Image (cartoon, rainbow, N blue to C red):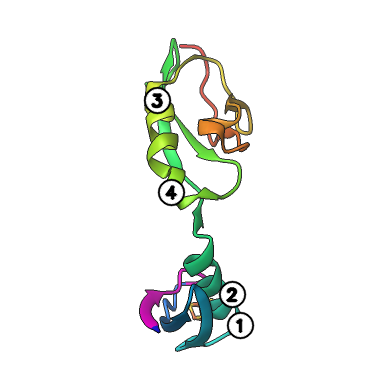
Amino acid sequence: METRELTCIGCPMGCLLTVEIDKGEVTSVTGNTCPNGERYAKKEVTNPTRIVTSTVVIRNGDKPRLSVKTKSDIPKSKIFDVMKEIDAARIDAPKKIGDIIIENVAGTGVPVIATRNVEIK
Ligand code: SF4
């Protein structure tokens, strides 16, 4: 039996969750104020995922970098690989919100998309 403490990231209340784990299975979650906390704790323990946000160097743009994010959650274990690929990317202006900047980042099946507009300077 293992006990883990997590802070729920579901809303600004940030409830402190206590999670009991037995043989890799969540057996109890306490400290949550709403059911989302239990869902978050179970997912965080068994299959943690995150949206990654960052910036990419953009050539000939009216701004030096383009803000980007993964279009959906990626496995937490892939964050380093995703950041490495985003850091290495070089793209050309113009780009607009929602444009795909990297397809299938780090083999996750998830694209990285633009979250702002950058025009040609
Ligand atoms: S358990 Fe519910 S109320 Fe508490 S931080 Fe998570 S989402 Fe918010």
Locate residue 89, reporting x and y percent.
44, 20
Structural distance between the alpha carbons of marks 3 and 4: 26 Å
Question: What residue type is disc 2 on?
Answer: Arg
Which stretch is magenta? Answer: 2-11
Question: What residue type is disc 3 on?
Answer: Arg
Locate residue 5, reporting x and y percent.
36, 79
Q: The C terminus is located in which quarter?
A: top left
Question: What residue type is disc 1 on?
Answer: Pro
Mark 1 CB near ligand 1 (8 Å cut): yes
Numbered mark located on residue 39 in the image? 2
Secondary structure category for the residue under label 1: helix
For image coordinates 56% across by 50% down, the residue present is: 73
Q: Nearer the viewer, residue 23 or 20?
A: 23
Secondary structure category for the residue under label 3: strand
Which residue position is annotated with label 4?
77
Secondary structure category for the residue under label 2: helix
